[in-house]
Image (spheres, rainbow, N blue to C red):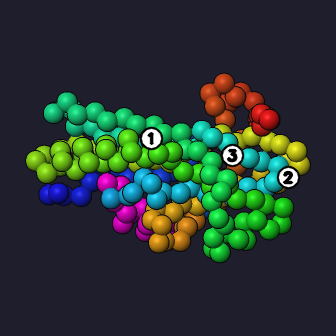
């Protein structure tokens, strides 16, 4: 490629609030990573939460898009990340399972991982001959739900990301408020929906 991916690289939640803590190491990671080189099959998202809150399939959305209007190229992919109950807990996240907390791992399914990979190849091929265009790579916590043991006094959620299988998870965001993840239909209420059985 003549140049690196020139678009905006964003890993973010649905809202950024005053109480949200984004570590400096995360800011550096965001500035140095290249979204076109991320292997979608190796990408893992982990959510640390109290036992009374859960993230289900589709609770996290991965948005990968690229637009080059001058050449009529428009890639707009939104993937619903799936829970992987069999993913082993790595040592760097063991603390997330203490003090009545749990960790949930999510990944793209095979079809979505392949779709994202093909989109990456399309962009790379395009950039071999063109320098225009911009793109985004966004991770959004769309929703969480409450289950048995939920407490309004214990709702803090942490987000971790792993980009390659030989890397450790890095803390992306800490101290997130789940009432900020409501859908448009739920925005008029502070109630977190109950998990469906």
Judged by depth in the image, the label closer to the viewer, 2 or 3, is: 3
Give the label, 1 or 2, closer to the camera: 1
Q: How many marks?
A: 3
Measured in 3D between alpha carbons, the distance from the residue under mark 2 to the one under mark 3, in whole angstroms, is 18 Å
**Which quadrant is the N terminus positioned in?**
bottom left
For the stretch drawn in magenta, what is the main secondary structure? helix
Asked if residue 29 lies in the magenta stretch, the reply is: yes
Residue located beneath label 2 in the image:
153
Residue 59 among those drawn in magenta: no
Helix, strand or loop under label 1: helix
Task: Give the CA distance from mark 1 to mark 2.
Answer: 39 Å
- Label 1 close to label 2 by CB (< 8 Å): no
Q: Measured from the top left, where is residue 133 in percent x and y?
A: 23, 42
**Which stretch appears magenta?**
23-36
Task: Name the residue located 23 percent from the left edge and 34 percent from the top edge.
Answer: 73
Above/below status of 42 relative to 121 = below
Pick the front one: 189 or 54: 54
What percent of the width, then of the height, locates residue 69? 21, 32
Labelled disc at residue 89: none
Question: Residue at the location (17% across, 45% down)?
Answer: 126
How crowded pointer 1 is (Cα within 10 Å; few <14, some 14-19, many 20+) is rated as: few
On residue 111, which mark appears?
1
Indicate the quadrant where residue 192 lies: top right
For the residues marked 1 and 3, what is the alpha-carbon distance in whole angstroms? Answer: 21 Å
Residue 3: x and y in percent read: 18, 58
The residue at 82%/49% (across/down) is 52
Along the line of sight, the residue nearer the viewer: 25 or 141 = 141
For label 2, the crowd category at 10 Å Cα-Cα, with few meaning under 14, some 14 to 19 and many 20 or more, is: few
Mark 1 touching mark 3, by CB under 8 A? no
């Amino acid at each position: 490629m003549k140049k690196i991916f020139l678009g905006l690289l964003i890993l973010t939640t649905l809202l950024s609030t005053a109480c949200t803590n984004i570590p400096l190491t995360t800011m550096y990671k965001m500035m140095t990573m290249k979204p076109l080189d991320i292997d979608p099959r190796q990408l893992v998202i982990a959510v640390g939460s109290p036992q009374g809150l859960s993230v289900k399939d589709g609770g996290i959305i991965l948005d990968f898009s690229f637009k080059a209007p001058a050449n009529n190229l428009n890639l707009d992919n939104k993937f619903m990340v799936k829970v992987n109950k069999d993913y082993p807990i790595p040592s760097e996240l063991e603390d997330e399972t203490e003090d009545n907390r749990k960790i949930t791992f999510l990944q793209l399914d095979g079809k979505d991982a392949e779709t994202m990979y093909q989109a990456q190849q399309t962009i790379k091929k395009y950039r071999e001959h063109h320098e225009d265009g911009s793109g985004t790579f966004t991770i959004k916590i769309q929703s969480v739900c409450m289950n048995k043991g939920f407490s309004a006094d214990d709702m803090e959620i942490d987000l971790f990301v792993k980009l390659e299988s030989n890397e450790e998870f890095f803390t992306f965001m800490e101290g997130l408020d789940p009432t900020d993840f409501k859908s448009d239909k739920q925005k008029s209420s502070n109630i977190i929906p109950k998990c469906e059985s």
